[in-house]
Image (spheres, coloured by chain):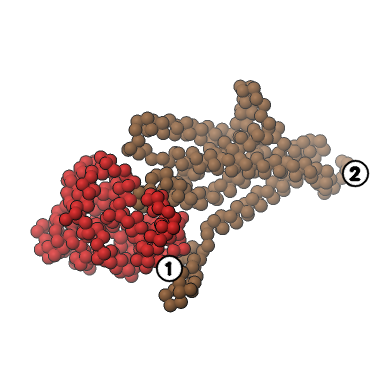
Amino acid sequence: MEVDAASTFFEWVYYIILTYWPLFLRGAGVTLLISLTGTIVGFGLGIIIGVIRTIPIDQNFNIIQKGLLKLINIILLAYIEVFRGTPMMVQAMVIFYGAAMVYNISLSPIYAGIFIVSINTGAYMAEIVRGGIISIDKGQFEAAHSIGMTHAQTMFSIVLPQAIRNILPALSNEFVINIKDTSVLSVISVTELFFISKSAAGVNYRFFEVFLVTCTIYFIMTFTVTRILRYFEIKLEGPSVYTIHGSQTVPEAEIRITDRERH
Amino acid sequence: MDKIIEVRHLKKVFGENEVLTDINFKVSKGEVVCIIGASGSGKSTLLRCLNLLELATSGEILFRGEDILTHDMSNSVYRAKMGMVFQQFNLFNNLTVLDNCMVGQIKVLKRKKEEARIKAMEYLEMVGMAQFINAKPNQISGGQKQRVAIARALSMEPEALLFDEPTSALDPEMVGEVLKVMKDLAKSGLTMVVVTHEMSFARDVANRVVFMDSGVIVEDDLPEVIFNNPTNERTRIFLKRILDDR
Ligand SMILES: Nc1ncnc2c1ncn2[C@@H]1O[C@H](COP(=O)(O)OP(=O)(O)OP(=O)(O)O)[C@@H](O)[C@H]1O
Ligand SMILES: [Mg+2]
């Protein structure tokens, strides 16, 4: 296909899609890879940190345990504050070039990207998880303690499952933000969607047409991800009906009862 | 008689506020002790101290003669023997009715799953909730929740069970079903300490009634004495007010 300066807008868009679709696809793939991995790892980090930061200071702890817990909490808080308080683009520069200079290792940009998105997400998720844990009714802890469960047992079998369910919307929100924000990784030459688009636009001097395509691809990704996660959220809420086993008159009968408190 | 709980000179202070002052009392095996008193008199705090949900400021709590405040026994082991039923039920919201009754047995008593299941079913049967094993807490009524909470506590096979106003959060028509279960338990010989505003339950079921006012035990006697001939003026005033309200 021939395009020149006189070609129409639609011809340009058509040309760009036709020529660059494998690159766009690869860029979108890298974007998805980094944001998905980063969100998952960051979520894991957030859970670990959120759980540690909500350990109550037990009167049974000895001085060393208390001191250690305090120290860990200070370090974690510093991590959270620093990574929430600086732009990810700047973090990317510092870590990527810092690793090269201080440790003399040149990270592959993709790994560097995954690393940066992960610890950045971790800082946000840590606070979200902590919020999720402390918003669980105190009665849940008390009931578990009253039958002898330890703090750890209570956390992992009772409180954390409820907290995670409550913060799932925040998690999918974080995933969507990551899909968009990986674009800043172009500063360390990660070949994600934005980086690819910039090159394609530069070669042809067609910024509007290229980025309109890019915009559409970003939107398709975030929209699809939002729908998929919403589906899982609904599934996780569990069945809204339950079965009564063996009614008194007909023992094999199963009566299905619908919810009382769910809409 | 076999003493299960003995409290000596128990004191609890929140900040500047002395909530419990020199509490002394005993509970023997198989006894049902009801604690009554005005709101804010420290009934819940006393119960929570007994279950170590609050740490007593000073004094002794003896469980079968062992002082639990000086850690002769681990908190976990002790609490498993001293069950608690809460006003707000506090069922584990993420677990089914059956799992609510199994999780403690498996995690704390280290029972096998099958054994835990059998025990749980036995007690769910007893409180009339065996049909609802697959329901989640938000799918059953308040009275049903409280009966499951009782089954959960019983599944641990505690030596004594503490109840903190178990019917106060219930709609009036559901109070009866919970009190019925509690009466059956009392008859079966379970040791119970019950904080309640249900005076008829205290009168009919309790072996002893303890009247508390502003952090002290004012009177501790047989229900007939407390309700018919209270020796203390404060008891008389409290009962008059409560019974007039009805
Ligand atoms: N965690 C706490 N911190 C400070 N003060 C508290 C705390 N818990 C209870 N109190 C105070 O202790 C006093 C006794 O409270 P408690 O809950 O034991 O009373 P109660 O007899 O159970 O009352 P009710 O019938 O309303 O349940 C109240 O004045 C209350 O404000
Ligand atoms: Mg109370």
The amino acid type, in three-letter code, at marker 2 is Glu
Q: Amino acid at mark 1?
A: Gln
| Rendered location of residue A72, percent (x, y) | 45, 32
Residue B178 appears left or right of A117:
left
**Chain ID, brown in image:** A
Q: Is residue B233 above or below residue A71?
A: below
Q: Can you tell which mark lies on residue A229?
A: none
Left or right of A194 on screen, residue B24: left
Q: Secondary structure beneath disc 1?
A: helix
- Which chain wears red? B
Label annotation for residue B131: 1
Q: Residue at x 64, y 28 (%)?
A: A96
Q: Residues within 10 Å of mark 1 (few under 14, many from 20)?
A: some
**Front-most of residues B1 and B92:** B1
In depth, the one of A172 and A232 nearer the eye is A232
Q: For the residues marked 1 and 2, what is the alpha-carbon distance in whole angstroms?
A: 74 Å
Discs 1, 2: same chain: no
Label 2: element kind: loop
**Nearest-to-viewer mark from 1 and 2:** 1
Splitting the image into 4 quarters, where does residue B147 fall? bottom left
Horizontal placement of B154 versus A119: left or right?
left
Residue at 59% x, 43% y: name it. Answer: A40
Q: Residue at x 54, y 50 (%)?
A: A168
Which quadrant of the figure contains the N terminus of chain B? bottom left
In this rendering, the answer to whether B51 lies above or below B241 is above
Determine the image quadrant of residue A195. Answer: top right
Residue A71 vertical placement versus B233 (above, below): above
The total number of labels drawn is 2
Residue at the spot 30% in from the left edge and 55% down from the top edge: B158
Q: Which residue is mark 2?
A: A2
Q: Nearer the viewer, residue A149 or A232?
A: A149
